[in-house]
Amino acid sequence: MPADDVHIHDMPTHDPTAHTEDIIVIDNLYKIFGSVMAVCGFSLRVRRGEVVVVVGPSGSGKSTVLRCINHLEVPTEGDIYVDGIHLEDKKTDINAVRAEVGMVFQQFNLFGHLSVLDNITLAQRLIRKRNRPEAERIAMEQLERVGIPEKANAFPHQLSGGQQQRVAIARSLAMNPKIMLFDEPTSALDPEMIKEVLDVMLDLARGGMTMVVVTHEMGFARSAADRVVFMDQGCVVETATPKVLFNEPKHERTKLFLSKIISH
Ligand code: ADP
Ligand code: MG
């Protein structure tokens, strides 16, 4: 639409995403826990289909930022918009926003007493209101996608860690999210299982999913990330393509951090 066709009073006043490709907008986010400033002045915009990897020392606020994106934590200050919806607006239906944002944690959080299939159909039936046959059909599609359809009737304790994490990813994908958040998804896995999970994530990234991934898997970042954000002490230190950030970091703090993680 040409600019002169837009009438000023037709424009939403508080929606910075309205005329952009940004599906996530985080604007000057603060999160304080008692005396701990977990996040202080963090801003980030993620375009539709973009893959952003977040790295940083332990305690730098990475998990808190991810948790604020689907409102598992309520910001102390600042604004977050997901697909144009302002999370801090009291009128916003947070559960509706959450249904569009899948999250995969370090711990897989599967229900131990439910089969793989039931783990994947539960939220679909409760939140997406799908009937059992439809939810099961979608669950099987997602299990195929993560490469373990034969595990549909197994229970979580019968699976390896890598397989459990793939079930957790399938469970998220079955909800047809617009965005996937990953918080150190391979950190709890034995080394030989890391690749099978990263391969699923790489596939997802190549398929055009918008992803924000906290990980120290630099190989993944190099092949999947459009941008890498280095954060420290609750805010962004620098953001660049993986090639630039890993090969020519600008800030001393970034150099120091990278020297520690790449050397081991
Ligand atoms: P990271 O994921 O980068 O390791 P976190 O976001 O988990 O960092 O934590 C950032 C800081 O906030 C840490 O100092 C952590 O101890 C603190 N923190 C995180 N969650 C809570 C909480 N629920 N209560 C109190 N402090 C918290
Ligand atoms: Mg964390």
Image: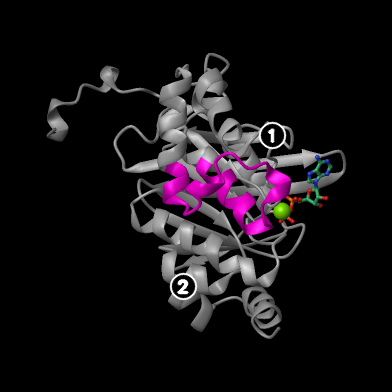
Residue at the limit of the structure toward the bottom, as seen here: 263
The answer to whether one can see residue 87 in this image is: no
Q: Main secondary structure of the magenta part?
A: helix
Residue found farthest to the right: 35
Image vertical order of residue 238 relative to residue 139, above or below: below
Is 83 on the left-hand or right-hand side of 64? left
Residue under the point 50% across and 27% down:
97
Q: Is residue 162 magenta?
A: yes
Quarter of the image for the N terminus: give it: top left
Residue at the spot of label 1: 73
Which residues fall within the magenta stretch?
142-170
In the rendered view, would you say 262 is above or below 192? below
- Asked if the residue at label 1 sits under 8 Å from ligand 1, the reply is yes
Residue, x 13% and y 26% (percent of image)? 5
Residue 241 vertical position relative to residue 109 in the rendered view, above or below: below
Give the structural element (helix, strand or loop) at label 1: loop
Q: Would the CB of label 2 be found within 8 Å of ligand 1?
A: no
Name which residue lies at 13% across and 30% down. 4
- 258 w.r.t. 34: above or below: below
> Could you say which is closer to the camera, residue 218 or residue 34?
218
Identified by mark 2, the residue type is: Arg
Horizontal arrangement in the rendering, residue 125 relative to residue 176 (left or right): right
- Tag 2 residue: 222
How many numbered discs sit on the rendered protein? 2
Q: Position of residue 160 (x, y in %)?
A: 67, 57
Q: Label 1: how many residues lie within 10 Å, few (<14), some (14-19) or many (20+)?
A: some
Residue nearest the observer in this picture, 85 or 96:
96
Q: Nearer the viewer, residue 182 or 186?
A: 186
